[in-house]
């Protein structure tokens, strides 16, 4: 049955993958079901909560709103692509230290939004942090410690400048 | 163990135990679990609020032989959800009592086919008249539950209020209302179930209380205890919303697994979760208060009513907590509380952070400001003149033996917020500024742990063991859902035993492994279960000292070596402790007198709110919260609890409206049910005063619910301060502000001059 579906090629966390799948299948479901990358979560299915946020070609998208055909040839980064060789990414380290994650269900999406924010604006002020995370809902923390996490990560490290150049466009 | 001695791990901001898994995206929530050959389940729900089921038809466009269909007739045991009263069916049988009530269950190997199949089940009804409000229910023209629509009543009396009215200098009356609130955990409810003739039913799911689900499944399947196993998966937020509801969903998934002989996963999407699962009870509270000429309380007569929805679920215990919190943190010689919970034809209301207290405290703390305005006293001064102190008695005549430091909390809240200077400035600025600013205060307590005799009935068991791999393992059914159970109980265990935090692990939250340490609710885990873990740790050390040669001073290596000597001798290294009530706790359920709670936590909160008289939006600009919660065991986690609770309660006050149409939630999407975002939450300043409680885990009392109790009245009191108009109901949306301010605007301007 799946033979009749087109093959869609994309790059996920630096790895080239090809999936045979209905072209209108949500990128979220392709990541979670076809590629078994379950770090990306579904919270609302309508682009409100941001739990399914991933980076696509250097932009933050709600993967529940992206049909996988739109991701053809795209460069996708998910939460599984943040840590390198088991070393926590500076944002992950900051979220851990500052209490930016409680139940953890919004955390992958929040981390991707924060990664995007720091990629385009390595030293955001508080208003910019609030705006950068406004599309990601957290019900546990009241956001305060998430803001502190982003501040701490930004203070400790500017993100990799090559990544910044590649994605800031 | 003394709570004042120096500790190494308790009190330190150690890292969240399961934090790395969550940050790497590898923590496994229920929907992340795939099983070979797994089917998916869906629910066919009622579309009318009340009626008899006349017929159920199956559209021939579906090949029904591909599906498993479960009805009430397939239930092997009792068709009810086991909570307090056995009134709620697991699946409707002949009659429905609210919209979105489950009637039929479907399972299929392809989850994408289920939506179509659900729509192909046609149910016809003979409608019965529904009841939607407290007022309709208490009129009793239409009886929709029992003989009188009444789930529960309480009468709480201290002294005698009746003779007071004729001699009081002031009498102030007011009516206050609160709406339903949705938990809006970001992970929807979900469950996976497996049936096996040998081992019985196993469920994995997003839940707070493994043994509640366990007990419920025993009844539905009529199985012995060892044939039901409940395992909590990583849980993405709960707030009480996964206290009672998972008992229903687990039964549904298990019934489908039982009939289909496949593993079945049921995960709600957001619309189904919002429409079908429990919410916070709406309330109406009426206050009549007598004061002397100096503003001292003489009598409080309180009439409290909650809307319980279609089935009783936890309404009686929510009403109990509302009753006990309704007089606020004040000393008053004469108190009467008459409380009722009424049935209506909406989805049953259930547990939600605060559990009746936020409703009761909204009323009393708004009322205090109305009293202050009426008798011409400053709201701060009115509260100060009436605060409870050590040795005073509450409305249940519980003597406050432990220190009560409300004055200190108030002083600190005033100084940290620079209250008086700010308020003076706002009065001046408001004269010319179209944005009116104000400050509002709320003072309150929250009872930690189960009410009255509740902890005795729970009779919790918890402890530690040592694994052959050399880890100290915490044995509890108390679950982690973001609030920090894993971390704080591990800190307590490490501290009590004198080893490193990294040498402690949590046993899996699996009823076949861990003892019943009670439900993870009521701000009881750190205080009650934490104390059991502390005792179990001390008991383990004594075992090792007495029987395995552990010295007075030891390293981690020496500790685990002693454990292995003990294991060689006794087979296992395990230390369990059972709950023992603190001395002097006496509670009479009949008269509602005595020690309502073993301990209280206290807070004073200040909200700064700006009301834009052009757009009618109210914005919380800054917030201060000063609380005494016993000893703070982990400052990062404790602060996070306070901040998160305040944000959630700001939504309760200003944004979150459950809009019911014909008893169905019409705005069951995140698009139109609005919670605070990163742009809405103000700077929140959190301050702890610490007075260790000797019967709590290393001195801790409860934290989780307290912060949700105060923000709604504090915010509305600030709006009163800003505009001169006292609003009596939440949620208070811009359209509500518009309605009042647009008609009364000139009065505000005049008043300001």
Image (spheres, coloured by chain):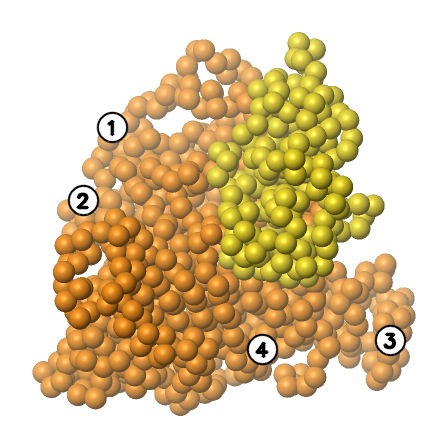
Q: What chain does mark 2 sit on?
A: B
Q: Quadrant of residue B322?
A: bottom left
Quickly name the residue at label 1: B126
Q: What residue sits 14% from the left and 54% below the top?
A: B743
Residue count near mark 1 (Cα–Cα under 10 Å), binned few <14, some 14–19, many ≥20: few
Which label's residue is closer to the chain start, 1 or 4?
1
Q: Within 10 angstroms of label 2, few (less than 14), some, or many (20 or more) residues?
A: some
Element at label 4: loop
The numbered disc on residue B142 is 2
Q: Earlier in the sequence, mark 3 or mark 2?
A: 2
Looking at the rendered image, the disc whose residue lies closer to the viewer, 3 or 1, is 3
Q: Residues within 10 Å of mark 3 (few under 14, many from 20)?
A: few
Q: Is residue B132 visible?
A: yes
Which quadrant holds residue B2?
bottom right
- Residue B267: where, in percent of width, then height? 54, 36
Identified at 51% across, 48% down, the residue is: A131
Alpha-carbon span between mark 2 and mark 4: 51 Å
The chain coloured yellow carries which letter? A
Q: Which residue is mark 3?
A: B555
Image quadrant holding the C terminus of chain A, namely top right
């Amino acid at each position: 049955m799946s033979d009749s579906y087109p093959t869609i090629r994309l790059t996920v966390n630096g790895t080239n993958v090809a999936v045979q799948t209905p072209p209108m299948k949500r990128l979220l479901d392709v990541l979670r079901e076809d590629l078994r990358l379950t770090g990306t979560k579904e919270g609302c299915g309508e682009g409100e909560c941001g739990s399914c946020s991933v980076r696509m070609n250097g932009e933050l998208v709600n993967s529940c709103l992206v049909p996988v055909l739109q991701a053809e040839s795209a460069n996708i980064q998910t939460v599984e692509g943040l840590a390198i060789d088991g070393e926590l990414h500076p944002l992950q380290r900051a979220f851990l230290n500052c209490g930016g994650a409680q139940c953890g269900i919004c955390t992958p999406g929040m981390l991707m939004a924060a990664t995007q924010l720091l990629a385009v604006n390595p030293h955001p002020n508080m208003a910019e942090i609030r705006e950068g995370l406004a599309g990601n809902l957290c019900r546990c923390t009241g956001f305060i410690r998430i803001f502190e996490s982003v501040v701490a990560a930004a203070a400790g490290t500017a993100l990799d400048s090559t990544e910044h150049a590649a994605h800031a466009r | 163990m003394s709570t004042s001695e120096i500790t190494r791990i308790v009190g330190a901001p150690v890292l969240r135990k399961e934090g790395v898994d969550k940050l790497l995206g590898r923590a496994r929530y229920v929907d992340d679990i795939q099983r070979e050959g797994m089917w998916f389940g869906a629910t066919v729900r009622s579309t009318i609020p009340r009626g008899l089921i006349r017929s159920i038809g199956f559209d021939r466009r579906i090949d029904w032989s591909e599906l498993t269909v479960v009805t009430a007739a397939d239930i092997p045991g009792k068709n009810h959800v086991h909570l307090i009263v056995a009134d709620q069916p697991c699946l409707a049988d002949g009659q429905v009592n609210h919209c979105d009530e489950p009637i039929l269950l479907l399972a299929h190997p392809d989850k994408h086919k289920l939506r179509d199949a659900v729509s192909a089940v046609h149910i016809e009804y003979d409608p019965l008249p529904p009841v939607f409000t407290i007022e309709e229910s208490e009129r009793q023209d239409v009886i929709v539950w029992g003989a009188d629509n009444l789930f529960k009543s309480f009468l709480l009396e201290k002294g005698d209020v009746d003779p007071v009215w004729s001699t009081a200098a002031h009498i102030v009356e007011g009516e206050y209302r609160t709406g339903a609130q949705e938990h809006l955990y970001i992970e929807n409810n979900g469950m996976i179930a497996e049936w096996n003739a040998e081992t019985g039913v196993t469920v994995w799911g997003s839940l707070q209380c493994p043994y509640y689900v366990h007990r419920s499944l025993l009844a539905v399947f009529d199985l012995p205890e060892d044939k039901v196993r409940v395992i909590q998966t990583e849980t993405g937020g709960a707030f009480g919303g996964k206290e009672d509801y998972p008992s229903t969903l687990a039964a549904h998934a298990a019934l489908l697994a039982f009939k289909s002989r496949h593993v079945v996963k049921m995960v709600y999407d957001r619309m189904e979760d919002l429409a079908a699962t429990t919410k916070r009870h709406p309330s109406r509270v009426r206050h009549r208060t007598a004061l002397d000429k100096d503003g001292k309380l003489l009598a409080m007569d309180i009439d409290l009513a909650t809307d319980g929805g279609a089935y009783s679920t936890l309404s009686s215990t929510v009403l109990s907590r509302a009753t006990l919190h309704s007089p606020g943190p004040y000393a008053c010689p004469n108190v009467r509380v008459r409380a009722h919970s009424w049935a209506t034809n909406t989805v049953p209301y259930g547990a939600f952070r605060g559990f009746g207290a936020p409703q009761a405290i909204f009323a009393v703390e708004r009322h205090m400001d109305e009293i202050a305005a009426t008798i011409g006293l400053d709201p701060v001064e009115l509260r100060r003149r009436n605060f409870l102190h050590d040795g005073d008695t509450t409305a249940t005549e519980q003597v406050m033996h432990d220190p009560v430091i409300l004055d200190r909390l108030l002083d600190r809240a005033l100084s940290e917020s620079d209250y008086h200077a700010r308020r003076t400035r706002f009065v001046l600025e408001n004269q010319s500024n179209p944005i009116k600013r104000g400050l509002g205060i709320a003072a309150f307590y929250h009872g930690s742990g189960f009410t009255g005799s509740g902890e005795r009935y729970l009779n919790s068991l918890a402890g530690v063991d040592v694994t052959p791999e050399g880890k100290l393992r915490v044995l509890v059914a108390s679950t982690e859902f973001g609030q920090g159970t894993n971390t704080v109980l591990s800190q307590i265990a490490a501290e009590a035993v004198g080893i490193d935090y990294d040498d402690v692990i949590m046993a899996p939250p699996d009823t076949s492994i861990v003892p019943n340490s009670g439900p993870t609710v009521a701000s009881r885990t750190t205080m009650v279960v934490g104390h059991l873990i502390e005792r179990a740790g001390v008991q383990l050390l004594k075992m090792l000292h007495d029987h395995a040669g552990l010295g007075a001073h030891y390293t981690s290596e020496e500790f685990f070596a002693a454990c292995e000597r003990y294991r060689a001798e006794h087979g296992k290294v395990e230390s369990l402790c059972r709950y023992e009530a603190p001395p002097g706790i006496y509670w009479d359920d009949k008269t509602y007198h005595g020690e309502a709670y073993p301990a209280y936590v206290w807070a004073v909160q200040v909200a700064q709110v700006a009301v834009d008289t052009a757009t009618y939006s109210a914005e919380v600009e800054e917030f201060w919260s000063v609380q005494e919660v016993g000893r703070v065991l982990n400052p990062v986690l404790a602060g996070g609890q306070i901040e998160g609770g305040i944000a959630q309660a700001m939504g309760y006050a200003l944004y979150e409206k459950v809009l019911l149409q014909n008893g169905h939630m019409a705005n069951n999407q995140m698009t139109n049910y609005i919670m605070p975002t990163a742009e809405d939450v103000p700077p929140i300043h959190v301050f702890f005063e610490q007075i260790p409680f000797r019967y709590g885990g290393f001195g801790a009392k409860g934290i989780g619910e307290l912060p949700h109790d105060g923000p709604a009245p504090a915010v509305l009191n600030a709006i009163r301060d800003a505009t001169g108009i006292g609003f009596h109901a939440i949620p208070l949306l811009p359209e509500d502000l518009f309605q009042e301010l647009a008609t009364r605007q000139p009065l505000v301007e005049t008043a300001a001059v």
